[in-house]
Image (cartoon, coloured by chain):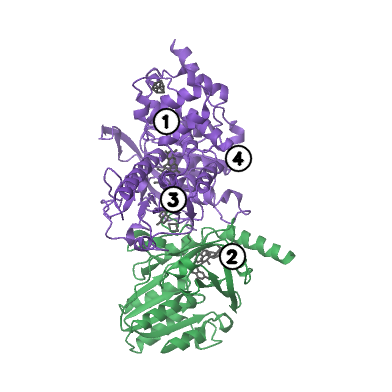
Chain colours: A purple, B green
Amino acid sequence: MFREEKSLREAPQLLPIEERISTFKEVNLGLTEEQVKREASRCLQCAKAYCVAGCPANVKIPNFIKAIREGDYKKAIEIICETNSLPAVTGRVCQVEMQCEKACILGRRGVPISIGLLERFVADLALKKGWKRFACKAFNGKKVAVVGSGPAGLTVAGDLIKLGYEVTVFEALHKPGGVLIYGIPEFRLPKDVVEKEIKTLEDSGVKIRTNFCIGKSVSLKEIFDDGYDAVFLGIGAGAPVVLEVPGVNLGGIYTANEFLVRTVLMKAYLFPRYDTPIDVGKKVIVIGGGNTAVDSARVAVRMGVEEVKIAYRRSEDDMPARREEVLRAKEEGVKILPLVNPVRFIGDENNHVIKVELVKNQLTYIDETGRSVPVPIEGSNFSIDGDMIILAIGQKANKVFTQTVPELKLDKDGYIVVDYEARTSLERVWAGGDIIRGSATVIQAIGDGKRAAASINKTLMSKSI
Amino acid sequence: MHTIVDKVQLTEGIFKMIIKAPHVAKSWKPGQFVVLMVNENGERIPLTIVDGNFYDGTISLIFQVVGKTTALLASKNVGEQIYSIAGPLGKPSEIKRYGKVALVGGGVGVAEILPQIRALKQVGNDVIAIIGARSLNKLILVEEVKSICNEVYVCTDDGSYGFKGFVSDALKKLIEEGREINYVYAVGPVPMMKAVSKVTRAHNIKTVVSANPIMIDGTGMCGVCRVIVGGEIKFACVDGPDFDAHLLDFDTLESRLKTYIKYEKKAFEDFTRCQCHV
Ligand SMILES: Cc1cc2nc3c(=O)[nH]c(=O)nc-3n(C[C@H](O)[C@H](O)[C@H](O)COP(=O)(O)OP(=O)(O)OC[C@H]3O[C@@H](n4cnc5c(N)ncnc54)[C@H](O)[C@@H]3O)c2cc1C
Ligand SMILES: Cc1cc2nc3c(=O)[nH]c(=O)nc-3n(C[C@H](O)[C@H](O)[C@H](O)COP(=O)(O)OP(=O)(O)OC[C@H]3O[C@@H](n4cnc5c(N)ncnc54)[C@H](O)[C@@H]3O)c2cc1C
Ligand code: SF4
Ligand code: SF4
Ligand code: FES
């Protein structure tokens, strides 16, 4: 019985491993229409749908699945877009096993509905067919500035343009999209998907100004002087944490952000056709266990290195990365070295890294996050060869904007403090996404954007500012 | 897209360009830089803003051809377009009244001290400039500097012009002669800034340098520009580029600048080879 049901869950087509490791082509090819129909028919259409509560943006999952069953894909995408503005993205990158699919009632028997893949199917179809997801009201006379073009900012822009606002998105980099464009690699989230999503917004009237760093090119005050009625800050966490151990500034040691910016955004793997270089080693060691670590490892595989290891301080099951990507990474040859911490990096005579010294950890008591706390085992140090190290140990709040507005209230780690409606301590300034949460997820950023857009609309419509 | 409105070759391998970039011209301050991409597949490189004109929305950049991107930029002419310019980035320099200040510029660094000279003079400092290059044919902006500074010392390594020796030697001589100097600002190659720092440390004179690590985004996101200041890791693009010279770890800065040498050389050679065949 259990077995039969397990085989019922539709599995996506995957690119063959040999092809994966030598290209940046998308690995998960999604479900076919036939599979989508079968998968949708498995849904119990629960009256009390746990799946909806499991989705941080509360996508009306049973409703859109019902529309799929009825063959009305257009309606399905409209339902999804009520609460999620970037479904082609979330359908690919959401940590479904921790969110909607974890909560799905069928999940208790190990065969949750493949909600992410269903969402992705209708979203891709909508992009392909160019279906309009919403109509825009006439200009209501108010202008809103959105700072940062990651998922949080794009959501605010989309929601407000619908309501008739004039919206301008300011982005510090030369391309919009935030982590979707500079961080998550092509083989997991093709850049043309992100570009199409952004183009849809631009076609609806959203203006995007790239190369424009707010706080530097113009100050927050000048934005208001320019006649904007509200500002949304979706500036991301952004800044990489640099491990403070001896040897961390040797050549060959990258932060994951640098490694991914060089490869994903600047396309260093196409050097010299693209001008940005990257010095790839032979033996790569990635430090960390989240999505950033796994993405970095898989990019390294594709750059033709000899071996890639991920050194993580807890056990493999504790890795916060998407489960699917960890499995894919292992198929692609990435080795996982659990329960270790780097102690120092050792360089050669040219100050280039050649080895890393690690210490073994043991798991001890369970902390408030429900995971075991790793503690180094004294005297268990050992070293392994590595001529390229990628540090993926987390992000912290970037100060490029906040350092220019000392009056904005931040918490002790530099994140912006907001209330339940995403309002900051400054009048007419809202914030959301990673800059209020620390490193979080795409769908949480979208959820914040939705909340902020609703609050901005409420405020600007009630007060005559 | 940004139009080049003027281009002048200052000396062998060093160019000045005036480029339309109203968003930068409007708000730049001395000490800040732009990150520029010559074309869509290009590399992002940082260049100091030497001047900016609020009224016509232009900025001046002065750069030395050292690799592919600067060579490509130098090959562009008046009327042509630059793909992208982000800025102004970095913290503005601290401009205040110190009393007697010495500004030290080496090589293309002479260009980068120009805005500092103007700003420091404007708030009432007595400004001495010490500028230098390897030899006379590498010297730039001597007349400009002379026209705004009370006192200018010019040095060349080979003695082909002015004082024979390094700018740090000239500074040392001035200090040892008993000249009162309350503040030193230096820009140039890392060994030069390191030498200046050594001279002023011995006399306990507050010294600031503009650090020039490799950068990509220039907005604090990638961490490639990390430098060590007083034992702590700082990102030059958001915490700097100006840092206290007596706290900055010059050796790490220098070794990290060499990371990409073999690739840069290849890109430069390929580029120069294509150029000759055109
Ligand atoms: C490698 C990697 C893999 C990930 N994988 C997943 C995944 O599989 N699933 C998932 O759900 N999440 C994943 N995440 C996390 C997710 O990408 C983030 O939580 C999400 O992108 C946060 O969105 P945001 O809108 O807050 O900010 P960001 O996406 O960080 O965008 C912020 C934007 O603001 C710009 N900006 C900053 N300051 C300024 C300024 N002063 N002026 C103008 N612009 C500015 C930045 O340049 C940037 O483009 C991953 C993250 C990384 C780095
Ligand atoms: C804040 C800042 C301001 C700067 N301002 C100016 C300026 O006003 N005028 C100017 O001519 N240059 C300036 N530089 C240096 C300039 O950015 C580099 O010369 C440029 O990036 C080289 O690019 P390339 O592709 O031509 O050469 P590459 O092929 O990248 O490099 C060639 C050689 O230059 C060295 N190099 C690479 N990057 C840098 C760097 N960031 N700093 C110093 N050396 C480097 C390399 O080690 C290599 O030996 C500045 C750098 C910083 C960080
Ligand atoms: S919990 Fe699962 S089965 Fe029930 S409605 Fe949601 S997706 Fe369908
Ligand atoms: S947005 Fe993410 S969490 Fe929500 S339903 Fe879609 S895939 Fe699940
Ligand atoms: S240049 Fe990327 S963090 Fe400074």
Please name the amino acid that badge 1 sits on: Val
Q: Evaluate whether label 4 is on the same chain as label 3.
A: yes
Q: Residues within 10 Å of mark 3 (few under 14, many from 20)?
A: few
Taking depth in this image into account, of B227 and B252 the one nearest to the observer is: B227
Q: Which residue is mark 2?
A: B67
Taking depth in this image into account, of B80 and B132 the one nearest to the observer is: B80
At mark 4, the secondary structure is loop
Please name the amino acid that badge 2 sits on: Gly
Q: Nearer the viewer, mark 1 or mark 3?
A: 3
Q: Evaluate whether label 1 is on the same chain as label 4.
A: yes
At mark 1, the secondary structure is helix
Furthest residue in direction right, as rendered = B277
- Which labelled disc corresponds to residue A96? 1
Q: Residues within 10 Å of mark 4 (few under 14, many from 20)?
A: some
Q: Which residue is mark 3?
A: A139
Residue at mark 1 to residue at mark 3: CA–CA distance: 38 Å
Q: Nearer the viewer, mark 1 or mark 4?
A: 1
Q: Nearer the viewer, mark 4 or mark 3?
A: 3
| Residue B125 point in image, percent of width and height | 34, 84
Please name the amino acid that badge 3 sits on: Phe
Residue at mark 3 to residue at mark 2: CA–CA distance: 49 Å
State yes or no: Cβ of the residue under disc 1 lies below 8 Å from any atom of ligand 4. Answer: yes
Question: Visible in this render: residue B146?
Answer: yes
